[in-house]
Amino acid sequence: MSNNSENEVGKDASDPNRAIGDKLRSYYDSVQEEPIPERFLDLLERLEEAEEKAAVEKNEE
Amino acid sequence: MKNSSFKREMLATLPSLRAFAYSLSRKSDKADDLVQDTMMKAWAKQDSFQPNSNMKAWLFTILRNEFYSQMRKKGREVQDSDGYFTEGLAVHPSQHGLLDMKDFKAALDQLPDDQREAIILVGASGFAYEEAAEISGCAVGTVKSRVSRARTALKEILQVDGESDYGPQGADASVTSRAFAR
């Protein structure tokens, strides 16, 4: 994704563009680096359990 | 097992998905709710996911569609580039030459939804223009145009051209009164 040639869409002010790009990625990375909140891990577990339970019940029919 | 590998892949994508949700939604406290809704929807339709295809793009598409669908239900207009309006305040970098994350987020929030989405997909999430176009359901040229306008708008809001003077005087009036539609 690092080829800047496709960024020539607009004007060629590459330095300010890169500054914007860097800031954007820093902002994005700062969120990405946060640990996953518990609620999502819990959700996945619950979803999986519900599915396994449904599968077991189905097998017992 | 198919389920556990789906779950593992989804888990691996979560940080990026969260970052996308935070960038896209204006209310940060709603971003995690959006991610949760997305995960539930994705789980429910996991059979429609082609194994070995791009899970990240698939999840991003679901999240994006969920975001706009929720906004429509709330009766909020989806802003496009021509109908741009600010939600209030002008944004100034908090210190001369320094941009902290809050400033940047505030600047992102000032963009029309379609531009914000485009620049996040291409500039931050690592998608190619073609992938971003698929996720957004539009033409590649449209994505490019939105990204370009987003960059221009951000440069103005954040005064990144290097020669402007920071602070409320001239910048303020121009940011709040000028429409970014071109």
Image (cartoon, rainbow, N blue to C red):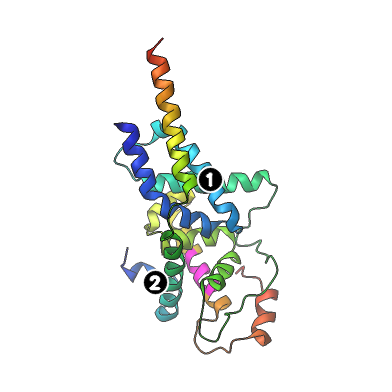
Q: Nearer the viewer, residue B135 or A30?
A: A30
Residue neighbourhood size for the residue with mark 1, other residues' Cα within 10 Å, grouped as few (<14), some (14–19), many (≥20): some
Total marks placed: 2
Quadrant (top left, top right, bottom left, bottom right) of the C terminus of chain B = bottom right
Q: Which numbered mark, 1 or 2, is in the foreground of this view?
A: 1
Asked whether B153 falls inside the magenta stretch, the response is yes
Q: Is residue B5 above or below residue B111?
A: above
Q: Which chain carries label 2?
A: A
Q: Which chain carries label 1?
A: B
> What mark, if any, has residue A61 been given in the picture?
none
Q: In this view, does B90 lie above or below B138?
A: below
Amino acid type, callout 2 = Glu
Mark 2 lies on residue: A8
Q: Identify which amino acid the numbered label 1 is placed on.
A: Asn
Is B130 left, or right, of B74 in this rendering?
A: left
Give the labeled residue for mark 1. B65
Q: Residues within 10 Å of mark 2 (few under 14, many from 20)?
A: few
Identify the image quadrant of the N terminus of chain B.
top left
Disc 1/disc 2 C-alpha distance (Å)? 29 Å
Q: Residue at x 60, y 44 (%)?
A: B69
What residue do we see at 39% from left, 69% from top? A7
Query: Nearest the camera: B75 or B167?
Result: B167
Q: What stretch is highlighted in magenta?
A: B147-154
